Each structure stands twice: as C-alpha cells, then as structure tokens.
Image (cartoon, rainbow, N blue to C red):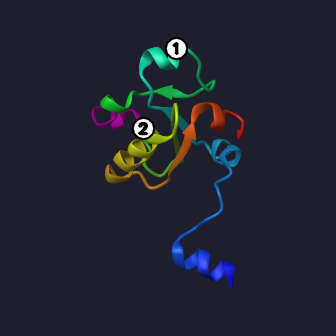
Amino acid sequence: MINKLKELLGIKPPPDYSQLIKEGGIIIDVRTKAEYAGGHIKGSKNIPLQTLNANTNILKDKNKPVITCCASGMRSASAKSILKSSGFNNVYNGGSWASLQSKI
C-alpha cells in the first residue's frame, strides 16, 4: 500500500549517481567560476547558472544523463528545470557538490 501511495505521488527512489556516470553521464556544476575553483568534483564541467541557457549547446546529446550540482541544491534545481525545458530528457538534481561527491 505504501508503494502504491508513493507511485501515485510520484515519489521515486534516489538515482544511482555512480551508475549514471558509468552510463556516460556528465556532472554540470552551476556555481560561479570562483566557487568552482575553490573545490569541485573531478571531471565535472563548470557552467555557471546565469550562463546555462546560452551554453546548452556544450551538452550535445540530449538523451545522455546530466547531473546538476551547486553549493546547496537550489541553483542545481533551477539548472535542472532549464535543461528539461531545453529538451534534455535525462536530468537529475544532484544537490550540493560535496554531498554528490560522496554518492559517486
């Protein structure tokens, strides 16, 4: 019964970020260049949120998994929305970069 309720509410288990990376997924860190320079996930791409709309062409495959991250999860949620509205099909909000790093 609980599972049926979760299904009706659209509650899904958290994604397996390690598996998404293994499947060719990329991590987009939407913090400022200065924040990114202070620490980031190895292999992630830095596209600050305020420039994301103009730079979605960097992400060529709209079906490839994309994981967004930032400092707290707020900007990465906005980034997820921007990417979804730009036609990206497989986008995940990874939350804070530090938390995401511990999950991959």
**Crowd around label 1: few <14 · some 14–19 · many ≥20 (10 Å):** few
Amino acid type at circle 2 is Arg
Spot the residue most to the left: 54
* Label 1: which secondary element: helix
Q: Which percent across, then down, holds residue 56?
A: 35, 37
Amino acid type at circle 1 is Ala
Q: Which percent across, then down, holds residue 92?
A: 52, 49
Tell whether label 2 touches label 1 (CB within 8 Å): no
Q: Which residue is mark 1?
A: 37
* Label 2: which secondary element: helix
Reply yes or no: does residue 36 show up in magenta: no
Secondary structure mostly seen in the magenta stretch: helix
* x 72%, y 35%: residue: 102
Q: Which percent across, then down, holds residue 9?
A: 52, 74
Is residue 47 shown above or below 11?
above
Tally of numbered discs: 2
Q: Which residue is mark 2?
A: 75
Give the mark nearest the N terminus, 1 or 2.
Answer: 1
First to last magenta residue range: 52-58
* x 66%, y 46%: residue: 17
In this orientation, which residue lies closer to the viewer: 35 or 42?
Answer: 35
In this orientation, which residue lies closer to the viewer: 81 or 91?
Answer: 81
Which quadrant holds the C terminus?
top right
Q: Which percent across, then down, holds residue 1?
A: 68, 85
* x 38%, y 52%: residue: 84
Say left or right for 94 vs 32. right
**Crowd around label 2: few <14 · some 14–19 · many ≥20 (10 Å):** many
